[in-house]
Image (cartoon, coloured by chain):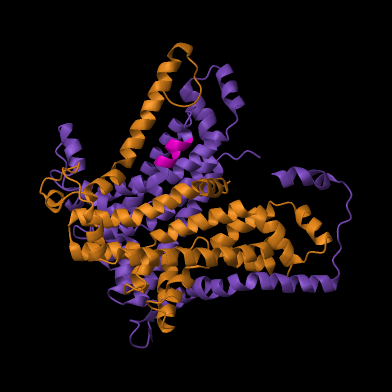
Amino acid sequence: MAVDTLFAPATAAPSRPSPKPTPRWRNRESLTAWLFILPSLIGFLVFTAGPVVAAGVISLLDWNLFSPPSWAGLRNFARLGPDPTFWSALGNTVYFTFLSVPLTILVSLALALLLNLGLRRVAVFRSLLLLPYATITVAVAFVWIWLYIPHDGLVNAVLGVFGINGPAWLIDDNWAMPALVVMSVWKSFGFGMVVFLAGLQAIPQQLYEAARVDGSSAWQSFRSVTLPMLSPALFFVVVTSIIGSFQVFDQALIMTNGGPGSRTTTLVMYIYRTGFENYDQGYAAAQSLVLFAFIVVITAAQFLLQRRLVHYDN
Amino acid sequence: MTTEAMPLAGNKVLIRKLVVFACFLVTAVTLIPVVMMILVAFQSDAESMAARPSFWPSSWHPENLTRAFELVPLGRYLLNTVIFAGGTTLLETVTAALAAYAFARLNFPGRSWLFGVYLATLMIPSQVTLIPQFVLVAKLHGIDTWSGMILPHAFTAIGVFLLRQFFLGIPRDYEEAARLDGANRWQAFIRVIVPLAVPAIATLAVFKFIGQWNNLLWPLIISNSDATRTASVGLQVFQDTNGTQWNLLLMAATVTTVPLIIVFFLTQRWFVRGITMSGLGGR
């Protein structure tokens, strides 16, 4: 900041001669540039870009890693159609996403609005509420198993106070997935909350004053000021939450291991099992590309919708 | 009821009290799982495994800490996690800062094309690269080695992307002043850009570190001995071998979580900034 003010007049100087680079200088500049990029580029090509291309190739192979691969063509993709486990994994993942994304957004938004009500110690509450986001998924998954213990676990004990006879949660066919959803919302709402809080704090107070002068109620000014001004942040959190929940794995592996039956087997868990328990690398690669395709289609659809729903102030 | 500033003067004090109460309430509810993890960790064997779980320990058993360390090498796992998370973070931050500087400031043929290639990989889920990375590491005999653990996760496009955005926002004049004083590009980068970019670099580092501390899938497939096993995988092994010995299981969970919580509280300024930066970057 200090540097900022120090140099500010120089920035404003109107007619500084723009340095015209000589060809020799340009060559040196490209050489320098490549030297700067090289460490990142080598690693990026070998460990990120290369593997993306390789995933396409491996998906066309029949390969268990131990014997030499053989050409499979599109057979791995054709196998997906009649594979009931794949479809149930896809269904479970979509179900998880449909439950967890709206819930996460609601909780994050509600807490951001609460913290934005002019509290004095906002930062303290914000840190404490952000804590679950900064814990280890595997570790807190254990606590949640404990919380969900059937009959006398803490969750059911609390429900019992209200006269509700809670289900067996993680071992109940219908409640295992909602139980995972609640844990995941708890783990991840902090991210959206912080984004929304920053968005709310950036809304100019004059807009609310103008709305009040016009006689708007609290609800009306929420709808006509807060929501439109917050829509870019909302859009961002929706997009990233959906991408994240399509990749849900850790808590499902630890808390239910995909069960009961295959009620909570997610796409990533199926990819993991196909690749690293059945050593069917070609089929696992094909599944991962299908997962990628879903993410691309959903994200693209959201960007199309965004044009109509998201308000950007220029 | 909701939203900002409805100053009904008479009710103001009451509303304020309600808001503070609501904040305390949601924070308390949110922290229950973390608090319970620590409480159960200190219960006796019998109490923690009783058919009817108890919430507040009727007697405290700090020896559970040493017992958990005796069952599995938790110290080793923690050290491994620091090596894994620290190694990926250090490599990623340094290489990404260098590359981001070139993409933001230097002209060279193919710049926008190459940056496009980086960008194109941003949206690709890590599961797509998982299998090829595993095959590559296996072929190079990198299974259960530190290079096999760290290298494949140290060169993502997101670091280059975020730091380039930040560097673009630094006025060129600062650097040009240094260049007029005879500094070359490298010196300008080290003396001018890096000091100004400390918040952005710290943000990236904190995010990467916490993310990798959490990483389960990659260590799960690459590490297969205590030499490289991280806390996440170690906990999973603990669960497999010790079943529902709740007090020790949650003691192990506490031991591996508390360091990360400390890191979080020490660096949360950057952590929060990182979240808002990425969020408002969505604009």
Quadrant hosting residue A36: bottom right
Most distant residue in the top direction: B10
Q: Chain A in the picture: what colour? A: purple
Q: Is residue A44 left or right of residue A21?
A: left
Q: Residue at coordinates 22% horizontally, 55% vertically from top-left?
A: B63
Q: Which region is colored magenta?
A: A123-128
- Determine whether B111 is above or below B26 in the image: below
Residue A11 in view (yes/no): yes
Give me the residue at 32% from left, 36% from top: B28
Looking at this view, is B113 or B192 the one in front? Answer: B192
Q: Nearer the viewer, residue B108 or B213?
A: B213
Does residue A264 appear in this view? no
Q: Position of residue B95 (x, y in %)?
A: 59, 67
Reply yes or no: does residue A89 show up in magenta. Answer: no
Residue B1 horizontal/vertical position (percent): 41, 23
Majority secondary structure of the magenta segment? helix
In this view, A160 is above or below B195 = above
Residue A289 picture location, percent across and down:
42, 67
- Rendered image quadrant of residue B215: bottom left
Chain B: what color? orange
